[in-house]
Image (cartoon, rainbow, N blue to C red):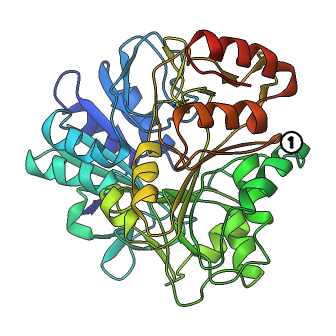
């Protein structure tokens, strides 16, 4: 590892092969400063990021690649979407998408190590793929990045070049409590038993669900990511104090980042570990809560595409749904609004308008109620969806459509 100046890093980028593949940390810890230097030094390149944020370089000569589309790449004409379960992205990097340079956002060196901080995810696999072919690994080392443990810890020789920065991490925008999300969250929380293991994402429904769980005890976290809702559970005494909080990345407030900094209970693991369905299934009573754009009367969920246009991709949803269903006492829940506020349409539809992301869920939850699916035949599942999940304005049309499709709904 060598600490370099901005000019030295730009010179190193200038020695990359023509049209290199750049793998960079995504989500909410993208190394934007280092990425900007690379963009100024390299005329043409391919940029692979998961959930890329707004503000990434966007010009002719920069082609995007991803397996989970974020706001910075969504709808872009130069985007190549590579469908993959998140647990298998490391295999993609090893076998099909070998990087020429990996850009990390880390802590500053301490005691012979660096920490990947709030974003581990696919980055250890990317580093290994780079090392296997002699590619360049660069760390944007930030004095404000919290130290986390587990697979976040890197030996100094895992990185070639380090450039130091001192800048705050992104934080979610403040939002008002949404009564619809609160209603959905309360219904989801009612399904969560004591001593459950939780997987939730970020957003109004996950936040509302966690807020409604502060009276539980012995809860555990095994999740792709977590945010301030987990800290609220910790403050309320709802979490098992002897169990590690296991995830692959986190995103939240300064208070959350202060809490995770140097916290031995927070264990950040690489994606192959957190999203391995077999490892997920070893957690008893694992309750997986995911969202969708729409669900249909055959209890299928589309969380990845609007029509034929990719919106996000299926990410880790399928990993956790399979793992939760194989967990002893586990549940795979899809939670969504019954009515899409922008499109002004029902989110419960006769048949999906886009490809299937997931199926065989335990329950579909909306603000209208809970459609209990597990163990019911196809007709009973459809009836549950119409009676308990669909918006009242959509129910008659769904019944008629169901009958035309061979589902004799009442």
Q: Quadrant of the N terminus?
A: bottom left
Reading the image, the residue beneath label 1 is 180
Q: Position of residue 135 (x, y in %)?
A: 16, 44
Q: Position of residue 124 (x, y in %)?
A: 28, 57
The quadrant where residue 207 appears: bottom right
Instruction: Tell me if residue 344 can be seen.
Output: no
Viewer-nearest residue: 207 or 107:
207
**Of helix, strand and loop, which one carries label 1?**
helix
- Which residue is located at x 40 percent, y 36 percent? 49
- Which residue is located at x 58 percent, y 31 percent? 379
Residue 210 sits above or below residue 369 on the image: below
Residue 308 sits above or below residue 244 on the image: above
Q: Residues within 10 Å of mark 1 (few under 14, many from 20)?
A: some
- Which residue is located at x 40 percent, y 51 percent? 322
Q: Position of residue 398 (x, y in %)?
A: 72, 18
- Which residue is located at x 50 percent, y 35 percent? 52
């Amino acid at each position: 590892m060598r600490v370099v100046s901005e000019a030295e890093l730009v010179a190193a980028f200038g020695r990359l092969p023509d049209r290199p593949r750049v793998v960079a940390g995504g989500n909410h810890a993208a190394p934007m400063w280092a990425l900007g230097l690379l963009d100024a030094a390299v005329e043409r390149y391919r940029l692979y990021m998961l959930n890329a944020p707004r503000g990434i370089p966007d010009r002719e000569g920069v082609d995007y690649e991803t397996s989970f589309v974020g706001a910075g790449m969504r709808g872009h004409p130069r985007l190549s979407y590579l469908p993959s379960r998140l647990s298998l992205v490391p295999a993609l990097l090893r076998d099909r998408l070998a990087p020429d340079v990996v850009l990390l956002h880390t802590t500053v060196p301490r005691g012979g190590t660096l920490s990947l901080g709030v974003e581990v995810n696919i980055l250890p696999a990317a580093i290994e793929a780079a090392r296997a072919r002699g590619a360049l690994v660069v760390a944007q080392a930030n004095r404000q990045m919290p130290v986390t443990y587990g697979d976040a810890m890197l030996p100094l020789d895992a990185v070639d070049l380090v450039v130091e920065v001192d800048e705050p991490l992104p934080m979610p925008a403040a939002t008002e409590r949404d009564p619809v999300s609160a209603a959905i969250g309360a219904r989801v929380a009612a399904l969560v038993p004591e001593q459950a293991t939780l997987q939730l994402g970020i957003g109004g429904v996950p936040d509302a669900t966690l807020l409604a769980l502060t009276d539980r005890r012995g809860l555990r976290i095994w999740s792709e990511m977590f945010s301030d809702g987990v800290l609220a559970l910790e403050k309320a005494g709802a979490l098992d104090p002897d169990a590690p909080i296991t995830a692959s990345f986190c995103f939240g407030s300064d208070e959350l980042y202060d809490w995770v900094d140097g916290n031995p209970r927070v264990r950040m693991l690489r994606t192959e570990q957190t999203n391995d369905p077999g490892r997920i299934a070893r957690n008893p009573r694992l309750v997986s809560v995911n969202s969708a754009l729409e669900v249909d009367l055959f209890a299928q969920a589309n969380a990845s595409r609007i029509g034929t246009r990719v919106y996000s991709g299926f990410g880790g949803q399928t990993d956790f749904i399979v793992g939760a269903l194989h967990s002893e006492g586990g549940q795979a829940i899809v939670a969504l609004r019954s009515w899409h506020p922008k499109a002004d349409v029902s989110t419960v539809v006769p048949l999906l308008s886009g490809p299937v992301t997931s199926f065989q869920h335990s329950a579909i939850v909306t603000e209208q109620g809970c459609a209990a699916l597990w163990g019911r035949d196809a007709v009973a599942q459809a009836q549950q969806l119409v009676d308990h999940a669909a918006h009242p304005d959509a129910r008659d049309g769904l019944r008629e459509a169901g009958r035309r499709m061979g589902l004799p709904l009442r």
